[in-house]
Amino acid sequence: MNFPGFRALLCCAALGVAAGGPARAADMPFFSPPEAAIDTEAELGTGWYLRGDVGYSNITSPQVIADIINSTARSGSISGSVGAGYQYNSWLRTELALDRSVIRPNATGTPFWCPYTARPLDTAARYDSSGVETAPSHPLGYAYDPNETCQARTTGNMSRITGLFNAYVDLGNWFGLTPYVGAGVGASYVRTSGGVNYYKTSDGSPYAADLSPTSGYPLAWYNIQNGNRENVNLPYAPQYWDRNLSKSSWKFAWALFAGASYDLSENFKIDIGYRYLNSGKYTGLAGFSGATPKSYDLISHEVRVGVRVTTD
């Protein structure tokens, strides 16, 4: 990759070091004259550090569940990470890190007819107190009330737990500021779950209707507003339409890093950086409507902020 601005910055910094003398030379092995570079090995029992950070990622996720149409778009996600590492010398360190991120897309469907109960209908027309017909006559059957509607709420959840072995190259200490680059390899455990739940539009309560037929009434729905028979393919039985699905898998993962740390004290650093994390292709859950999900590369671009505590 070509970073002309960054190379210019490094050249300027090198000139500054040459002009300012060897006072910081020991901290900058890559840019100091060979005779001034001092690469001190970490003593036994020192050089260890712990780190923790939080990140905001812009991630391209697979459809967590195919019924959620917009879940393939890029979305934001918060992640957290902890790790432990070892600083070998002034420029090389490695660590083991574990982090977790979660994506929770959801969608609400348009209202559709769903009978709240199986109400038997007789053949007589209905009238209000003034004698105006409110419902025409019809054959025996069950009431189809257009005002009885439900909405489906579909939710998805994708949790990604990633373990990485990371290696970093520190590019010298510039008045307490240490830029770095790095790379990591490991694995991601991805678990996806999805559910659909139905609610009455009238009051928002869960829909769980008992549509068991009444003896002597034929299995037919008649519109109480016009008397027409409705061609509805709906079983006459208790209706529990809520559904849940889940799946999980392991994926190879790799990452690239770039950032900088700043020395708040001898043993305490604040770290701000960028991470590119690739967990490979992943396919979400098939929809309850029969829709098939697509596969996408599970890639996130992340901005991360954290702290690093070193030992003496």
Image (spheres, rainbow, N blue to C red):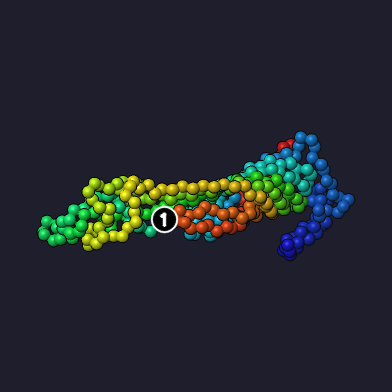
Residue with the most extreme right position? 35
User: Disc 1 marks which residue?
Assistant: 108
- Give the image location of residue 175, x and y in percent: 73, 50
- Give the image location of residue 221, x and y in percent: 27, 56
- Give the image location of residue 291, x and y in percent: 48, 58
Quarter of the image for the N terminus: give it: bottom right
Front residue (pair 180, 270): 180
Front residue (pair 177, 186): 186
Dot 1 crowding, Cα within 10 Å, few <14, some 14–19, many 20+: some
Question: Which residue shows up at 76% across the image and 61% down it?
Answer: 7
Asked whether residue 250 appears in the rendered view, the answer is: yes
Mark 1: which secondary structure? strand
Q: Is residue 300 left or right of residue 4?
A: left
The image quarter containing residue 89 is: top right
Front residue (pair 232, 262): 232
Question: Which residue shows up at 49% across the image and 48% down it?
Answer: 245
- Give the image location of residue 79, x and y in percent: 58, 48
State how many labels appear.
Answer: 1
Question: Which residue shows up at 76% across the image and 59% down it?
Answer: 10
Q: Amino acid at mark 1?
A: Thr
Quarter of the image for the C terminus: give it: top right
Q: Is residue 268 left or right of residue 35?
A: left
Q: Is residue 273 left or right of residue 44?
A: left
The image quarter containing residue 48 is: top right
Question: Which residue shows up at 65% across the image and 45% down it?
Answer: 163
Vertical placement of residue 297 versus 211, above or below: below
Residue with the most extreme left position? 130
Asked whether residue 262 appears in the rendered view, the answer is: no
